[in-house]
């Protein structure tokens, strides 16, 4: 989850690509599509197989990202899914998978070019902007979701569905995953903690400690292993170690104090930001952070796997210990110093959507419903083929199939949380058997921002956002990774941001937030 959030923060907002042209055609196209596929879809469907009575099968393209792109066994997975979906739903699926660095570009080019792209994850592509550009299908048009996807609402809940509205219109469906995140968390390789004699508690997934205790751990690790990097910040470390609700996908106007009050404030003049940057500066001065941290693009999990880094920032949740251990290739211990929290944008961070270019909206919704409710295909998409990629253990949990490991599996993408509904899939070994129930409770019991479900429309301040983002990009890593003195760096950055229009962005967010709150 941390990688996703890091990339989301650093994405540059794009201007509309022929949005006006799409808006002009929207009503006509939407009506024609519904008429073409017809209101008789239910009566023409074979209730046993999901096929049309004619035996015809609809081919749909489904797209999402993994960190490394399409795994080697993608064709096998596609064939295994189709062996089920053709028979049950009359749908043949083509999986179109990109790596994280190219997913947004590939997706937007396909959508703007009118290429077939029926259902897809909006991850990394800025869901509200895609909606405003006219690329997403209105999922309530002609009762699309209630007629063909009511089970999705049942699976995720109406509250989460409503949180995905953009200007009141439903363009996306939230996936079942960790909506909350444990703030103030750090992952540290267990072997190094054992090396300093730290008392570990194997009965819990996450050890709750204070920030002072975490600082003491870092000090001991540095003394014991002076040649290793103690801690590496990531792009979202600042917000992870905070009570800040970042509104609209950027830090330019935020809610402090876990979003308990709907007052938009300047993060960069807050006591929190000053204290955080001062702590990073202290870490850097003590030698905890590598000198190439601002230029090295290697994932922190890969650095831990290589044995050069001991710890990094992560988000807490049920299952995080096993998740990070799998990514790092060694046992990890998770510490948490702050509260569990659901931010305003958490639910609608990367919904699943249907392209406005689809020729088969009803079938597209049917396919999404299948992945939200059919555990057979959900397990294949998440874990692969039983016996080839994974096996079921006697206790009901799963692990790699015989003769297969993380490096040799042809379907080991580590993005089950991105897929529509991981709550109906197997639980991987190393997690508590009640993982999915624990995640549901985690989401329910966490603190929630009062702005939950608010979507910021950046149109009126798009120029200012670009200008302020340029300033932030100039200073962010230097300040938040501890390479420049915060006493001078923060003031210099904030001054340039104000000149670039930060105050106008804050004002616009407050206006929109007040208007949104008035309708609740």
Image (cartoon, rainbow, N blue to C red):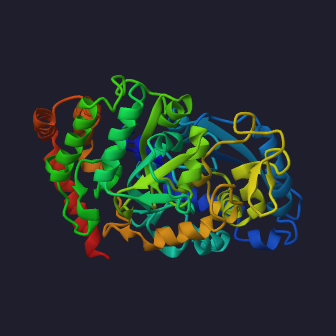
**Is residue 450 visible to us here?**
yes
Q: Nearer the viewer, residue 300 or 464?
A: 300
Q: Nearer the viewer, residue 149 or 274?
A: 274
Residue 26 horizontal side relative to residue 512, left or right = right
Q: Taking 254 as reference, is 291 above or below it?
A: above
Q: Residue at x 69, y 55 (%)?
A: 429
Q: Taking 27 as reference, is 198 above or below it?
A: above
Q: Nearer the viewer, residue 451 or 22?
A: 451
Residue 416 horizontal side relative to residue 76, left or right = left
Image quadrant containing the C terminus: bottom left
Q: Position of residue 422 (x, y in %)?
A: 64, 60
Q: Position of residue 15 (x, y in %)?
A: 36, 40
**Is residue 114 visible to us here?**
no
Q: Residue at x 36, y 23 (%)?
A: 292
Q: Within the image, what quadrant is residue 167 found in?
A: bottom left
Q: Taking 168 as reference, is 63 above or below it?
A: above
Residue 332 horizontal side relative to residue 467, left or right = right
Q: Position of residue 255 (x, y in %)?
A: 24, 59
Residue 142 horizontal side relative to residue 360, left or right = left
Q: Residue at x 65, y 42 (%)?
A: 413
Q: Within the image, what quadrant is residue 343 found in?
A: bottom left
Q: Residue at x 66, y 60 (%)?
A: 368
């Amino acid at each position: 989850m941390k990688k996703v959030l890091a990339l989301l923060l650093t994405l540059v907002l794009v201007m509309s690509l022929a949005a006006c042209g799409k808006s002009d055609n929207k009503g006509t196209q939407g009506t024609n599509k519904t008429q073409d596929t017809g209101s008789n879809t239910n009566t023409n469907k074979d209730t046993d197989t999901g096929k049309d009575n004619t035996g015809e099968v609809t081919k749909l393209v489904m797209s999402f990202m993994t960190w490394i792109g399409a795994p080697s066994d993608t064709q096998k997975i596609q064939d295994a899914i189709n062996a089920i979906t053709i028979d049950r739903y009359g749908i043949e699926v083509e999986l179109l998978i990109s790596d994280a660095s190219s997913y947004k570009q590939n997706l937007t080019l396909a959508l703007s070019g009118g290429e077939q792209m029926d259902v897809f994850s909006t991850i990394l592509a800025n869901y509200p902007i895609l909606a405003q550009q006219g690329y997403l299908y209105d999922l309530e048009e002609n009762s699309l979701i209630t007629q063909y996807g009511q089970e999705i609402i049942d699976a995720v809940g109406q509250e989460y569905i409503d949180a995905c509205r953009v200007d009141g219109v439903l363009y996306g469906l939230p996936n079942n995953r960790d909506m909350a995140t444990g703030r103030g968390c750090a992952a540290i390789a267990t072997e190094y903690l054992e090396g300093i004699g730290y008392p570990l508690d194997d009965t819990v997934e996450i050890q709750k400690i204070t920030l002072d205790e975490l600082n003491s751990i870092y000090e001991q690790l540095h003394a014991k292993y002076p040649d290793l990097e103690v801690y590496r910040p990531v792009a979202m470390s600042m917000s992870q170690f905070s009570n800040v609700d970042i509104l609209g996908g950027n830090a330019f106007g935020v809610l402090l104090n876990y979003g308990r009050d709907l007052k938009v404030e300047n993060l960069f003049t807050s006591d929190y930001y000053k204290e955080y940057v001062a702590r990073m500066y202290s870490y850097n001065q003590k030698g905890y952070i590598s000198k190439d941290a601002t230029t090295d693009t290697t994932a922190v999990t890969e650095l831990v796997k290589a044995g050069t880094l001991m710890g990094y920032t992560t988000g807490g949740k049920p299952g995080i210990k096993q998740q990070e251990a799998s990514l790092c290739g060694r046992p990890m211990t998770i510490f948490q110093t702050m509260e569990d929290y659901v931010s305003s944008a958490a639910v609608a961070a990367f919904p699943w959507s249907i392209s406005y270019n689809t020729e088969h909206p009803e079938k597209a919704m049917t396919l999404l419903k299948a992945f939200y409710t059919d555990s057979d295909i959900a397990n294949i998409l998440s874990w692969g083929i039983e016996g080839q990629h994974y096996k079921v253990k006697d206790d009901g949990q799963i692990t790699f199939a015989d003769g297969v490991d993380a490096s040799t599996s042809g379907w080991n993408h580590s993005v089950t949380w991105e897929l529509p509904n991981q709550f109906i899939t197997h639980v991987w070994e190393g997690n508590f058997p009640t993982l999915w129930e624990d995640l549901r409770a985690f989401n329910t019991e966490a603190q929630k921002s009062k702005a939950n479900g608010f979507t910021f429309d950046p149109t009126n301040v798009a120029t200012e956002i670009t200008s302020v983002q340029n300033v932030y990009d100039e200073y962010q890593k230097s300040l938040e990774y501890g390479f420049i003195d915060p006493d001078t760096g923060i003031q210099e950055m904030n001054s340039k941001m104000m000149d670039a229009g930060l105050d106008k962005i804050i004002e616009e967010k407050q206006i929109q937030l007040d208007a949104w709150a008035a309708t609740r």
